[in-house]
Structure formats: structure tokens, C-alpha cells
Amino acid sequence: MDQVKIGRFIANCRKEKKLTQMQLAEKLNITDRAVSKWETGKSLPDSAIMLELCEILGITVNDLLNGEVVKVDNYNKELEKTLIEMVKQKEENDKRLLALEVVIGVLSVLVLLAPIIIAAYLPMENWQRIVLCFSGVIPCFVGIFYAIKIEQVAGYYQCKNCGHKYVPSYKPMVWSMHMGRTRYMKCPKCKKISWQKKVISKG
């Protein structure tokens, strides 16, 4: 999706409705800065307010995501194109998130190990060693929490038995056995437990 094109389209539609950025923002209960970011192509409207925005501007969601009014005879074709583009964009975002997960995981381990190594080799009182060793535990657990959260929402897990692809809840992610990004979990469709691989695409 072309964010700059969408931004220009939002600005033109707003002006056609004779609304200022502030007036549009007030109707949507957001800041005029958010509207400005849309219109300059720096961000896209949140999905939670997209329908309301389209209603105010007198356009469809498909028009909005295409950055232009889609003709009726081209509607289905353009809608399909938009949906494919959105799926591709989600897959790219998921790949970036999973790469970030690796970085967070490595940093979390380093934060845990660094104080332990320092405590082992530098001269200090025993109580200081204990405090230093525990100083890396909380940051490490916070990092691991976010790493698991990223792995949960980015992409899907595929059941080995029935092939069903789904996003698991956080609890089984935390407590399941795993090898890398393959986890031993219960499939919500066939109800069987198996080693399930992380996949990016739902297709």
C-alpha cells in the first residue's frame, strides 16, 4: 500500500467535506497530529477507527486502502488486489518481528550472564556478588516475556496432524516444550498434541 497516496486521498476527501484536520480529529476522538501523520504518509489510520473515518469522508475502506475512489466495475478486482497486498505486508512485518525476537532473546541472555561473569571474576563482598547476580534476572525475564509475545503474534503455528494454522494464546506458548520455534502444543481444531512449526503465511 502506498501510504503517501493514501495520505493525499484522505486530505482531499477531508477538504471536499470542508473539514479542518482539527475538526476531523474531534469527530474521531483523536489528535489533529494523528490526522496530519496520515495526510503526510507517515502512518495509516488504525483499523479500530477506519470504518468511522470512511463514513465521515463518504468513501469505502477499499477506496481508502487504494488511495482513490474505486469504480464499481473494478471493485472486486481492486478489493482482491488490496487484500493480497495487506497479506504480503503482514508477512513482511511478521518476518521483521521474528528477527527482533532473536535480538531481544540474545540481549536478554547477555543481560543475565554479564553480572554473573563480573561477580565471578572481580573482587567483592559475597553480598555484593549476590545482588549483582540477581540484578540481571528481572531485565532478562522482561526481555523473554516480550520475545515470547512477539513469537506468539507473528505468523502462525501449524498443526502436524491436521495442518490447521492458528495463533495460540500466550499461556500455552509459555508452558509448552519447544525446540527453537517448534512447540509441543494442543491444536484448537483437532484437539491433538503435536510438535507444531512456526509459519509466516496462512495460505
Image: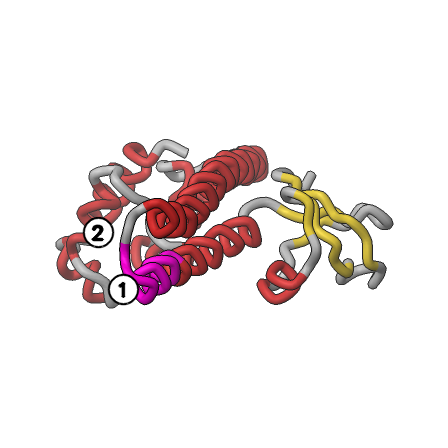
Left or right: residue 135 versus residue 192 is left
Q: Nearer the viewer, residue 189 or 42?
A: 189
Query: Which residue is found at the position 32% from the left and 38% from the top?
Result: 6
Tell me where residue 19 sits by quadrant.
Answer: bottom left
Q: Where residue 24 sits: x, y (%)?
A: 21, 59
Left or right, residue 189 beside residue 3: right
Q: Residue 48's x, y, as percent?
A: 40, 61
The answer to whether 38 appears left or right of 149 in the picture is left
Query: Where does the N terminus fall, quadrant-wise?
Result: top left
| Residue type at the position of mark 1 | Leu
Asked which secondary structure carries label 2, the reply is helix
Tell me if 181 is positioned left or right of 88 in this view.
Answer: right
- Residue at the image position 39 percent from the left and 46 percent from the top: 117
Q: Is residue 92 visible?
A: yes
Estimate the x, y position of residue 148 in percent, counting from the top left.
53, 54
Q: Which residue is mark 1?
A: 28
Question: Any mark on residue 35, and which?
Answer: 2
Query: Can the viewer see residue 82?
Result: no
Q: Nearer the viewer, residue 198 or 164?
A: 198
Which sits in the foreground, 180 or 64?
A: 180
Indicate whether 74 appears above or below 53.
Answer: above
- The x and y percentages for residue 157 are 68, 48
Which amino acid type is shown beneath numbered disc 2?
Answer: Val
Disc number for residue 63 = none
Q: How busy is the neighbourhood of tag 2: few (under 14 within 10 Å), some, or many (20 plus)?
A: many
Q: Is residue 55 magenta?
A: no
Cβ atoms at labels 1 and 2 below 8 Å apart: yes
Magenta residues span: 124-136
Q: Nearer the viewer, residue 76 or 137?
A: 137
